[in-house]
Amino acid sequence: MTLKDGYHAFDFADLSPREAYKVMIGTIVPRPIAWVTTISPDGVVNAAPYSFFNCLSADPPILALGVENKPDRGFKDTAYNIRMTECFTVNIVDRVNVEAMAVTAAGFEPEVDELAMAGLTAVPGDHVKCPRIAEAPVAFECERYLGISVSSAREIILGRIVRAHIREDVIDPESYYSDHEKLDALGRMGGNGYAGTMDYFDLPTPSAEDILKNLAVRTASGGA
Ligand SMILES: Cc1cc2nc3c(=O)[nH]c(=O)nc-3n(C[C@H](O)[C@H](O)[C@H](O)COP(=O)(O)O)c2cc1C
């Protein structure tokens, strides 16, 4: 690590996986949280939060999860169930459900129904075998699209959204606009931190033409 011109420079080749993880999770914030529900081949319902998560494509509609394997390189229940059933559902975490979500992050044995542990209700999927969480404001039913073993320690799982369930007060079905205040989604920060989404503002992207015009005006007036 070097300090130059006010910046610490980290070469990732010199960092341990844990150090790299800490650098990334503390600075790539806030991360959306996928509250993933799956079902085991024996029919046990599983739920767990994953903040190595985002939407990567709308056409086709693709979501990505980053799942760390266990210290013995075995799959977490989520990765195992997705592999065995080819499906998963991403539920969105809102503030009301954050404590229930934390319960589902605990390291229960595979035979434990984590939704039951958290006092949540499983609703059968319409297009997929796994359930969604009745209490969540949004749920995306996904079919496994692609799995990438980036190393023996990490799986990246891509899912293709086949159906979305969005609480009626959250989305306008005519315009497809969602109300972020009604949604009240949470993001994940570093450590055990979370962030809300109420600190919201609009900033339209300026046109290149307007930027150039403003620069020309500033230059002509001698300003910076
Ligand atoms: C908010 C939050 C985000 C998390 N994000 C991830 C993640 O992106 N990848 C991961 O492997 N584990 C993540 N975890 C840890 C898993 O949720 C935890 O290991 C869980 O027990 C896995 O459950 P499963 O074996 O039922 O899949 C996260 C935990 C919390 C509380």
Image (cartoon, rainbow, N blue to C red):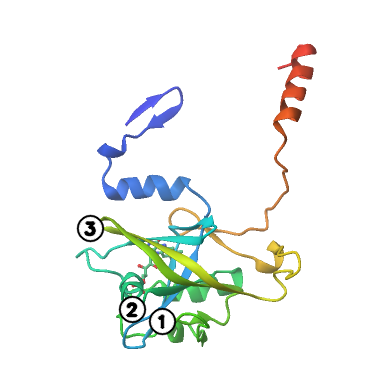
Mark drawn on residue 114:
1
Q: Is mark 1 within 8 Å of ligand 1?
A: yes
Name the kind of residue labelled 3 in the image: Ser
**Which structural element holds mark 1?**
helix
Residue 43 at x, y = what percent?
36, 88
Mark 1 vs 3: CB contact within 8 A: no
Could you say which is closer to the camera, residue 11 or residue 219? 219
Quadrant (top left/top right/bottom left/bottom right) for the C terminus: top right
Name the kind of residue labelled 1 in the image: Glu
CA gap between label 1 and label 2 equals 7 Å
CA gap between label 1 and label 3 equals 26 Å
Name the kind of residue labelled 2 in the image: Phe
Give the residue displayed 50% in from the left and 63% down from the top. Answer: 33
Q: Earlier in the sequence, mark 2 or mark 3?
A: 2
Give the residue displayed 21% in from the left and 64% down from the top. Answer: 73
Q: Earlier in the sequence, mark 1 or mark 2?
A: 2
Q: Which residue is mark 2?
A: 108
Could you say which is closer to the camera, residue 146 or residue 40? 146
**Which structural element holds mark 2?**
loop
Q: Which residue is mark 3?
A: 152
- 43 vs 215: above or below: below
Disc 3 packing (10 Å; few <14; some 14–19; many ≥20) = few
Give the residue displayed 26% in from the left and 58% down from the top. Answer: 153
Residue 106 at x, y = what percent?
37, 73
Mark 2 vs 3: CB contact within 8 A: no
